[in-house]
Amino acid sequence: MSSEKQVKIYFVRHGETQYNVEKRMQGFCDSPLTDKGIAQARSVGKGLNDIEFKAVYASESQRVIDTATYAIGHRNIPIKTDSRLKEMNFGVLESLLATEITAQYGNILETLFSLKDFNMSAPEGESYLQLFSRTNAVINEIIENHKHEGGNILVFSHGVTIGNYLMQLAKLSDYPHHENCSVSMINYINGDFQVEKIADTSFRDLYYLK
């Protein structure tokens, strides 16, 4: 255990997408980054520019890969993709407008996002417990890969995926909304996790005017 060194993971939510603008339910389905989303990605990359990263991981969703690519910019670091970093699967609600969901399924969104029950899921989707299980598995693998040399790791993912992981990891009752390209951070050493930041927009906003 004494040979372990601190691993600090920086989680970044993807930039604004077309479905974000249209307020469509976007989990496993995908839509392209908007011009604003590209600017956010470049800005958060500049905000993180002074930090040396040992590795970069990203969800397999194209909106996240594109965010990571714009954020990494000139840095010569390969982006390793992993399907377990994808957004929550919202099942039959995928790509629907909030108004369409309410018309077809009543107040399901209010129930789903109340965070009262981690077994809750959309029809044909996955629960918060299932989401945490896959996210936790990949984060533990990332830590295992880097804990002997230590250092900073950059992980690009999604709002609910990141928020749910931090909430269940730290036994929080809730978590703040993760704006596009907000940053959350955890420290790990010798089996101990500490949440340092949740949904911090300062890295992005240093170089980005809303």
Image (tube, rainbow, N blue to C red):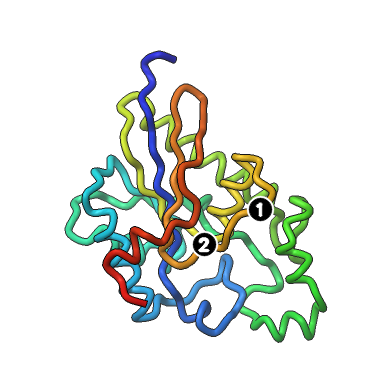
Q: As rendered, which of 31 and 51 lies closer to the eye?
A: 51
Q: Check disc 1: other Cα within 10 Å, few if <14, some if 14-19, many if 20+.
A: some
**Where is residue 43 drawn, in percent x and y?**
29, 66
Helix, strand or loop under label 1? loop
Q: Quarter of the image holding residue 101? A: bottom right
In the depicted structure, whether residue 136 falls above or below residue 14? above
Q: Check disc 2: other Cα within 10 Å, few if <14, some if 14-19, many if 20+.
A: many
- Amino acid type of disc 1? Asp
Q: Quick one: which residue is furthest to the top in this view?
A: 2
Q: CA distance from mark 2 to mark 1?
A: 12 Å
Visible in this render: residue 145? yes
Helix, strand or loop under label 2? loop
Left or right of 176, for residue 173: right
Numbered tag placed on residue 174 in the rendering? 1
Q: As rendered, which of 130 and 108 lies closer to the eye?
A: 108
- Residue under the point 63% across and 62% down: 89
- Residue under the point 28% across and 40% down: 54
> Mark 2 highlights which residue?
178
Q: Quick one: which residue is furthest to the right in this view?
A: 106
Quadrant of the snapshot with the C terminus: bottom left
Q: Are marks 2 and 1 in contact (CB under 8 Å)?
A: no
- Residue under the point 38% across and 74% down: 37
- Amino acid type of disc 2? His
Left or right of 139, for residue 114: right
**Where is residue 197 drawn, in percent x and y?**
46, 48
